[in-house]
Each structure stands twice: as structure tokens, then as C-alpha cells.
Amino acid sequence: MSKTIQVEVGYQDRSSGPTVAGKVNVEAGSLPVGIGKALREVWKTMDRKVRFDAAKNGMTIKAQVVEAAASATASDAK
């Protein structure tokens, strides 16, 4: 059963402070898998200096399941 998970990844920038690196919607079977997929997608878009700042100062990951109940309801109705 696939879920739509919205993940927001942030980090502490060296000059501007807290920064959002990206916000991604992914399809995954569970929350940890969705976080991993989204983190890989966002990490690929970052340049070298931004990756260094994120790795040095840590990353903030906010995730929530956007669409799971609607698909479960639709499958039960069949």
C-alpha cells in the first residue's frame, strides 16, 4: 500500500541561518522509506558548499503522510 509523503529538508546555512533545502512529495510504502527517497532527491540538488554546511551543522527533516486514508478508503469501496 503506497502512501504519499511530504518531506521538508532544512539545514543551518553559514551566512543566512536556518534554510529550507527542499520540499518533496514522494510515493513510498512507509515513512522511513519516504524520508530516505526525499533526502536523496534533495541532496542531489545541493551544491558542494551547501552539502558541507548541511553535513557540518546537521539537517532538519519534517515529514508527514499526506495521502494514505483516501487510497485505503477507495480500495475498501471496491
Image: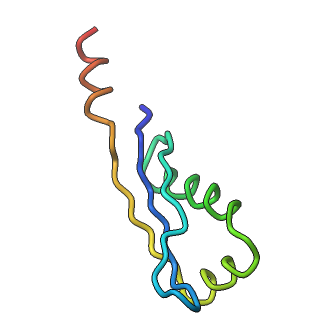
Q: Is residue 38 above or below residue 78?
A: below
Q: Residue at x 51, y 78 (%)?
A: 11
Residue 34, given in percent of the width and then of the height, sits at 49, 50
- Where is residue 7, by image quadrant? bottom left
Q: Nearer the viewer, residue 15 or 31?
A: 15
Residue shown at 68%/77% (left/top)?
51
In the rendered view, would you say 37 is above or below 71? below
Q: Is 55 on the left or on the right of 62, as rendered?
A: right
43 with respect to 48 (left or right) = left
Residue that lies at the very extreme toward the front in this rendered image: 16
The residue lying toward the viewer, choosing from 68 and 59, is 59
The answer to which quarter of the image holds residue 47 is bottom right
- The quarter holding residue 14 reads bottom right
**How many discs mark residues in the rendered view?**
0
List x then y, in percent, for residue 67: 33, 37
For this rendering, which residue is in front, 61 or 31?
61
Left or right placement of residue 75 versus residue 41 in this view: left
Q: Which residue is pictured at 43% across the width and 47% down the height?
A: 30
Quarter occupied by the N terminus: top left
Image height of 77 relative to 56, above or below: above
Quadrant where the C terminus sits is top left
Q: Pick the residue in front: 34 or 66.
A: 66
Residue farthest along the top direction in this orientation: 78
Residue 16 image position (x, y, % from top left): 52, 86
Looking at the picture, how far across and down is residue 8, in whole percent?
A: 45, 61
Q: Is residue 39 above or below residue 47?
A: above
